[in-house]
Amino acid sequence: MKKSSLHPLTHIFIVLLLSTFVFIAKTPASLLCLTILAMLYAGWRMENGWQKVFQTLWHTLPFLLILAFFQIVFRRKGTMLWSYGILKITREGVLISVQLAARLLTVIYCAKGLAVMNYTEFSKAFSALRLPEELSFMLSYAIHLVPKFLSQLKGFVTGLKLRGIDAAKLSLSKRLQVYKQLSITALAELIRSSETAAIALELRGFRSEGKHSILHQQKFSYRDLLCLLIFGALVVLVIRI
Amino acid sequence: MLILKDFGISFAERKLLDDINLKIPEGCIFHLKGPNASGKSSLLNAISGIIPEYVKAKTTGNILLGNMDLQTIPLKEKYHYLWHQLSDTEAQLFFPDCLSELAFALEHIALPPEMIIPKINLAAGQFGLENMLYRDPSTLSGGEKKLLLCAVAETINPLLLLLDEPLNGLDKQATDLVLKWLKSKKEQGKIIIVADHNPLIDAIVDGSFTLPENPRPLKLDNSLFMKTDLNLQNKQDCAVGHLPEVLYNIEELSFAYPNAELLVKDLSLNIMNTENILLQGKNGAGKSTLLKLLTGLLKPGKGKISLKGKQLQGLDSKNFAHFYYQSQITRENLLGISVKQNWLFWQLAILELNDLTLKEDPLFTELSAGQQKMVSQQILPYLLSKFWILDEPFASLDENASKQLLQLLQYKSQNYPGMLIVSHFLEEHRELFDRVLSLRNQTLQEEK
């Protein structure tokens, strides 16, 4: 994870700003700008950020294109742009597909930017707001749920390879059966590991009563405020486009 | 004094432990003994309160620490009185760096920050971890993780210490460190309960209690480990020929984890397919990392590894034709959620395998650490013709299971030679090996 000198709460606010305003924005230009901002943010936050940003785009692209195709082709109401037989493309269809793609991408990049934060950072952020540490644990677990599940699954696929099983060479029905079983196992492991993590933390006083101290206290500084002001101004500017 | 009065544990309708009466005074190291699955971990879980707060089970009787009924205190407040080191080390480490692992409990005790750092430094120094405070715990070796948890216990320093397999996977030096630490805790008047199969613990204990065998143990197909059945593997496709040839050719190999020092540097080595090799080294020397490099799980930073003349390009299912690898972490060697499911995955890999003759199909979560290890090793007799790469295969096994595995290794070393094993247990069985290599100062040194 890249170290950031900003307060973790600043990062949460940035992500909240982007992911909220992308649902308020309506014009394609503002949506596109917000998506680019989210991409820039995720690229800045992640290790090998730019590579990962483009990888995500590449992996999401087929889904986005399918989504766009259905929106464009099957939305019949609105100003006609092009038609051929039963196929019709309307201005509204294009607009909605752009909106959907931009919103989805922004949310994905925001989640990626937030997923680099660990429990300690969530804890710092929420303790600044005097929120209970259970919330930090829950949110940090929820944010990492998908990456953890995928990493579990990857571990099991490694286990298959170590047994000489090449899933790609199995028949489709067997492959589906194997992946179904591995997905169930990954899910079960995820639940078990969250419980063990809770036990491990409680054995060290997690959720205990009384006052707690913080080893590395991080205060919300003028830099955080400045960053939020600039970011907020940018987002408002973009919305007005 | 810790008092267990008429104490018992039942899972659903099944009684695991019954009528346990123990009195353990302060300043005492108490050894909890028993075969795999006898309930050692469950008893420790019950004392700490994980049972019944997290693991649903019924308990009877009382647990008193002095005049205090431990069962009335919620788990989250127990850290004032006890530390429980679980046998599953991986599960107990949570934070991105060792410093945060050590600081967490101290922050909850509300120790002022200026007092936390000296306390952490002292504890880390006691276990040789002073240079690892900013390292990600997941990159530590198995032994180092154990030491880190001991250091956590040292920072909290409660009256009662419950230690489940604290010596598992430790080298001699680290074992001595932990034993010395336990003696010092005893002198400080702590109550220490240790469950560990390592016989070295017997030298320092003041008392022990042997749990009876589980009334309903998992009947693993142990006949697989019997010599008479070992001709089964002849039916398998023996990819490794019996003629000696070079299996691995390692040239100027170097490797380091991100933000860490080099573990191996310019290492060159040939490994024959019929060689029996024991790999030794201190905890954290890079033994497990070297095995992972040989399997393709890790990619070399510099240099190259050739397997049967072809450069190893990461993990490839085809390599199973040449070797079989078992990780130190048992769960990584198991697929599925139950014993039968794991076997079904093996049947997918080796079509000739018969079905398991098990009446029940227990979930892995229902098995003890030792039982899980045994399940992961059930396949070994079927893979005798392959080159074995095993990382700490004896960890968590009780005396009986260790004896069986040792017999299997003896059989393989004589009849189907070809293995590379990392094990602190096998240091006393060097006769099984043609070569004993020691990983020291980033390089391998031949000891035999």
Image (cartoon, coloured by chain):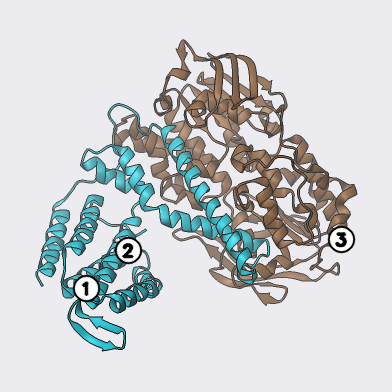
Chain colours: A cyan, B brown
Give the label on residue B234, or none.
Answer: 3
User: What is the chain letter for disc 2?
Assistant: A
Q: Nearer the viewer, mark 3 or mark 1?
A: 1
Label 3: element kind: helix
Identify which residue is drawn at 76% across, 71% down. Answer: B246
User: Label 2 belongs to which residue?
Assistant: A108
Which of the image's four quarters has the C terminus of chain B?
bottom right
Report x, y in % for residue A218.
24, 46
**Disc 2 residue type?**
Ile
* Residue sitting farthest toward the right: B228
**Disc 1 residue type?**
Leu
- Residue B242 as seen in the image, left or right of residue A75: right
Identify which residue is drawn at 51% across, 35% down. Answer: B150
Labelled pair 3, 2 in contact (Cβ < 8 Å): no
Label 2: element kind: helix
User: Label 1 belongs to which residue?
Assistant: A32
Category of crowding for the residue at label 2, using alpha-carbon neighbours closer than 10 angstroms: few (below 14), some (14–19), many (at least 20):
many
